[in-house]
Image: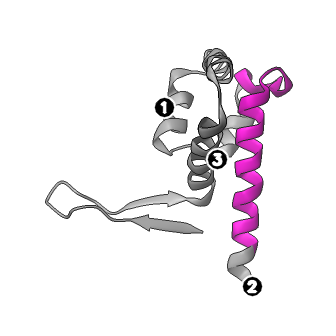
Amino acid sequence: MISKLEGNKNKFDKDLYVDSLNNNLQVNLFNEILNWNSDDFAEFIRELEYISSQTANDLIFGNVEMRKLLNLNEFKNLRKHPMLTKLFFKSYIMSKIDSLKSFL
């Protein structure tokens, strides 16, 4: 399922499409941040140090591809990074649920 985000129209604007996974990632990250204290935020930043800058940018700007994440060497041992693991897999599962809902 792809949602369409529209901004002000001018010659530089394009319609932006955010897939269900990235939409869920960004919403889940936002909701998590709302509940964090300073220790939680510091832990998340420490976990971000274990992923490439490209993956971090993809997460922030909604361009994550789960198949690439699962093949990256940096995610071989996800259980060492509980905050990122929870965020990615919760979002992945929610995107699959969204896909199933679209068929009903």
Quadrant housing the C terminus = bottom right
Residue 104: mark in rendering: 2
Disc 1 to disc 2, C-alpha distance = 34 Å
Amino acid under disc 2: Leu
Q: Is residue 43 magenta?
A: no
**Count of numbered marks:** 3
Q: Nearer the viewer, residue 23 or 69?
A: 23
First in residue order: circle 3 vs circle 2: 3
Quarter location, residue 82: top right
What element does badge 1 sit on?
helix
The residue that disc 1 covers is: 57
The amino acid type, in three-letter code, at marker 3 is Asn
Circle 1 crowding by C-alpha within 10 Å: few under 14, some 14–19, many from 20: few
In x, y percent, where is residue 52? 57, 21
| Residue indicated by mark 3 | 28
Question: For the magenta stretch, what is the residue range?
Answer: 73-100
Q: Position of residue 67 (x, y in %)?
A: 69, 44
Q: Residues within 10 Å of mark 3 (few under 14, many from 20)?
A: some
Q: Secondary structure at mark 2?
A: loop
Farthest-out residue, left: 11
